[in-house]
Image (tube, rainbow, N blue to C red):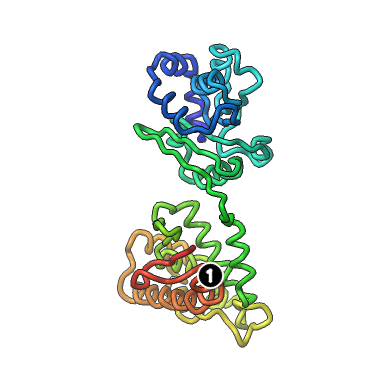
Amino acid sequence: MDQKTIQYYENHALECSRKCESANMSHLDHLLLRHLPDKGARVLELGCGPGREAAFLLRSGYDVTGIDASRGMIDEALRGHPELTGRLSCEAVPLPEDSRMLSESFEAVIAVALFMHIPDQDLFETAFQVKRMLGPHGVLFIGILWHSLVFQLDEGGAVRSIDQVETIIRRDRKAATYKLALLRALCDIAQTEFRKAHWYPDGVAGVPFGLVAEKWLFYYWPLVEPDVVGLSGTVAFPQQRGAERSRPIAFRAPLRELIRQYTARGGLSGFSQDYRNQRLAGSSAALADAALNAIRNTIVAGPVQYAGGEQSIRIGGSGHQLFLR
């Protein structure tokens, strides 16, 4: 949660607490009791605020723990609901890695009017932390705006995302930088441009193939640039260790031509501004297209083919989507 939001609740803790306590939340109480596990279950509330939901669940027979980023809100919660003493702590989400909560297991996690306060770049980490704290078949209840969302963790034969990533790394039969570049691109997209990904009913995620190629262009630019500016007299930075002369980066030539065009125009920074502001034209646009097409072909011939093929990564949608299972 960003500091500005936390400070707002610090400054208006009493006012926010009174508004929440005076509101008719019977519909929320009904939904919680309907979707949460049986009474006695351990429940973690993220963003517990003035403690209204935590106190309700405690009275209903649940073993409740609550956290909130605002110390002022925690104080108001304990003032209004002293029965929550020892059950609340001041922590923001995503939680720091040394938080004891991350080593706990809960049968349900609830978050009411919280996720709209989490910056986009922190949503991915927050989701992974929630999954980490949920026990088998645990329930996640999210209240956001006028909607309530309920999820259940399916542990039946499921493979953790980190295990799938490790499988891709191990299955790749080449000691190349390409697989690492692909994983880095997918991680970047997941953290900063996740809205461009599309989830399909069969458990497959699709990301724009062109976006992955763009990431590669920016990753490899600094590696190829020494060839152009004269800092290297040999073919440096191969895609495979020990193969400096026989296995250079496959798209080195078209990328080098694009870099050469921008040597006197601000280098990577100048290209980035032109590209992101759609100012490429003429030979610059043609060279960028050539480099991106060469990168796309390399991704298909390299990590897509050698990282498990159809089982893990494949190309589809007329070549415009990179599908991952």
Q: Please report the residue visible at 57 percent of the width from the left and 70 percent of the height from the top.
A: 179
Q: Nearer the viewer, residue 321 or 201?
A: 201
| 1 left or right, relative to 85 | left
Q: Position of residue 84 (x, y in %)?
A: 60, 18
Q: Please report the residue visible at 53 percent of the width from the left and 45 percent of the height from the top.
A: 153
| 279 left or right, relative to 172 | left
282, above or below 17, in the image: below
Q: Position of residue 314 (x, y in %)?
A: 46, 71
Residue 222: name its quadrant: bottom right
Element assignment for label 1: helix
Q: Is residue 64 visible?
A: no
Residue 183: name its quadrant: bottom right
Mark 1 = which residue? Answer: 220
Q: Is residue 167 visible?
A: yes
Of all residues shown, which one is farthest toward the front? 38
15, above or below 39, in the image: above
